Each structure stands twice: as C-alpha cells, then as structure tokens.
Image (spheres, rainbow, N blue to C red):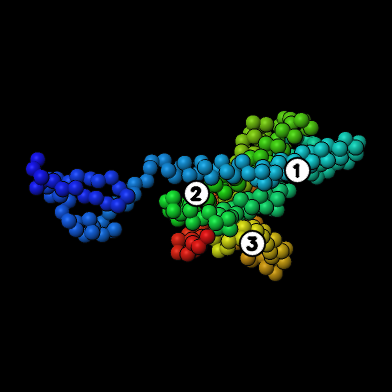
Amino acid sequence: MSTAETRTRRTPGLVPVTETLRTTERHPPGQAEQLAPAELPPPARAPWAFWRLLGSELGLTFRRPRNLVLLAVLAAVPIILGVGLRIAAGSGDEEMTGIIQDVAGNSLMLTFLSFSFLVLLLMPVAVSVVAGDSIAGEAGTGTLRYLLAAPAGRTRLLVVKYLNAVVFGYAVAAVVALSALLTGLILFPAGSVTLLSGTTISMAEGLLRILITVGYVGAAMAALAAVALALSVFTEVPIGAIAGTLVLIIVCQVLRAIPDLAPIAPYLLPTRFTDFDAVLRSPIDTGALRDGLLAFGAYIALFGSIAWARFSGKDITS
C-alpha cells in the first residue's frame, strides 16, 4: 500500500488508528453527523426481562423483615382465636350457641371465622403497606429515577409493582387460611361440615370451599392493592399512601353503618370483602361471588387507569 493511500489519525488520549482509502470510502466524512438520534434503532430488550424484574421485586418483598412480621402477625391471629374458642368450648357449658358451637363442631369453620375477623382491617393493612410503598417508597429513597433508566419503562415498572402487590395479597390470604386450618385440625374434630344453610358436606368439599374462599379474598386484596398503588404515584411519602388507603377503608365502613346511605353501600369496596360467605351455602351462591369479582375488577380497572395516567406523565425528580 502506497504512502498516499494511508494516513494516520491521531486523537489525544487514544491509540493512533491507521485508515486506508477503503475504510474512508465506507465512512465518508460527515456521515456520522448526518444520522439523527431518532434514526438509531431502539435498544433491544433482553427476553424474559419482565419476569426477571418481577422475580427480583418479589424476592425483595418477601425478604423484607417488615413484610415477614406482617405475615407472622396474620398467622398468629387464627391461633389465638382457636385457643380462645377451645377454652370456651371446654368450659363445660352445655348451651353453647353461635360461633363457638360452629367451630367446636368442625375444625374447618375456624378458617371462615378467621377470614371474617381479619378481612376488614388487618389484611388490608398488610396489603396497603406493600402496595402503598411500591412507587412512593422508590421515589422517597431516590431509586425511582434509576429504575426507569435501566430501562424498565414506566408501564412495565407499574405493572410489575402491581403484580408484586397482588402476589403478596394472595400470600396473605393463603397464610391466614393455612394457619387457621392447621389450628382447627389440632384443636377441634375433623369431619363433615354443617353449612349456614343447614346442609352437611364432606370434609373434602369443605377444603374445596376454603380454596374458593382464598381465591375470592385474594381478588379482594388485589382490588385494594390497585387503590393503594394509585395513591402511591401521587406522593413520595409511603406512609401517606398507606394511611390514605386505610382511611378510605375506614370511611367506607362508617358509610356502610349509616342507614340513610344504604343505596351506595353495594358500590363501596369493603362491602364485597365478606361475600365469601356465599361458599357456606348449599348450593354455593355463585351470584354473590360473581358480583363481588365484577366489583373488584371495576376497582382494579378504575384505579389502575388513574395510576397509569398519573405515572406515565409524571416528572420523575427523585
């Protein structure tokens, strides 16, 4: 190669690079400057990136001591209820009625009693803590900006945060059911179950109805998680989103207790929380379960849309 066909390009701080006429013809001067940033292809997302992000989020959630303490408290409540009812049943009173008689007669009834006791307050507290902290917690600690620069994408990040809260909500329902079921089997006799309608079913069918109850209560917690997530995108203080969700639940409970406001009660979210008692009838009141699931779906769609509309156009400064 002749000397005229080669030249050495020197750039301060870099190793000299020898260019030939062939390389300069492939990259004419000024061509790189003519390429607009919009013409560059978008960075390709690695396959399974969504599921890896969700798995990482779930790992953080279920390793956090605060969340484990919440699950432990929820698991302890059915044990306390069971022991208390066992002591009351063993007092020798032959005129036991109501709840004590139902639970003392069959171990599976403790599960339904535990859900009735926890679904209106303690379970919403646990779910609100996780869902309310999802976006506000990242903003408060200054990590939200870096999550979006990963790039995670705002919509994908919001979906991951919501699914994480939904999984935790179902975990809450499963922990309560498992704790109550084991406690009931230890303290009370097992066998056929007498429903609220007076019909007796086998223990296997009773376990199936408990499984349906877990699914229904989990869906209720998913709807509550959508409300907490929507509040979470409006603040950088997690306690504000958590407290706002709990205040909303309490206000709905107060409104339900006012007779003059009975027409609006069916549209309040907590009204549907206890409709799982439809499984204690023969046949199962599928209409009540369907209406409850439709209400949960409506809340998820409404508050999920609010969260997406706010988060997708929000200026991320932290």
Tell me if residue 185 comes above or below residue 134 in the rendering. Answer: above
- Mark 1, other Cα within 10 Å: few <14 / some 14–19 / many ≥20: some
Q: Secondary structure at mark 1?
A: helix
Residue designated by label 2: 160
What residue is shown at x 49% (from left), y 62% (from top)?
Answer: 316
Can you tell which of label 3 and label 1 is closer to the viewer? 3
| Image quarter (top left, top right, bottom left or bottom right) of the N terminus | top left
Label 3 amino acid? Gly
Residue designated by label 1: 77
In the shown orientation, is residue 44 left or right of residue 228?
A: left
Label 2 amino acid? Val
Label 1 amino acid? Val
Whole-percent x, y for residue 207 in the image: 64, 34
What residue is shown at x 22% (from left), y 55% (from top)?
Answer: 32
Mark 3–mark 1 Cα distance, whole angstroms, equals 27 Å
In the shown orientation, is residue 123 left or right of residue 140?
A: right
Where on the picture, by quarter, is residue 133?
Answer: bottom right
Residue designated by label 3: 240
Mark 2–mark 1 Cα distance, whole angstroms, equals 30 Å
- Mark 2, other Cα within 10 Å: few <14 / some 14–19 / many ≥20: many
Q: Nearer the viewer, residue 316 or 132?
A: 316
Q: Secondary structure at mark 3?
A: helix
Q: Residue furthest right?
A: 92
Can you tell which of label 2 and label 1 is closer to the viewer? 2
Whole-percent x, y for residue 43 in the image: 34, 49
Residues at marks 2 and 3 touching, judged by CB atoms closer than 8 Å: no
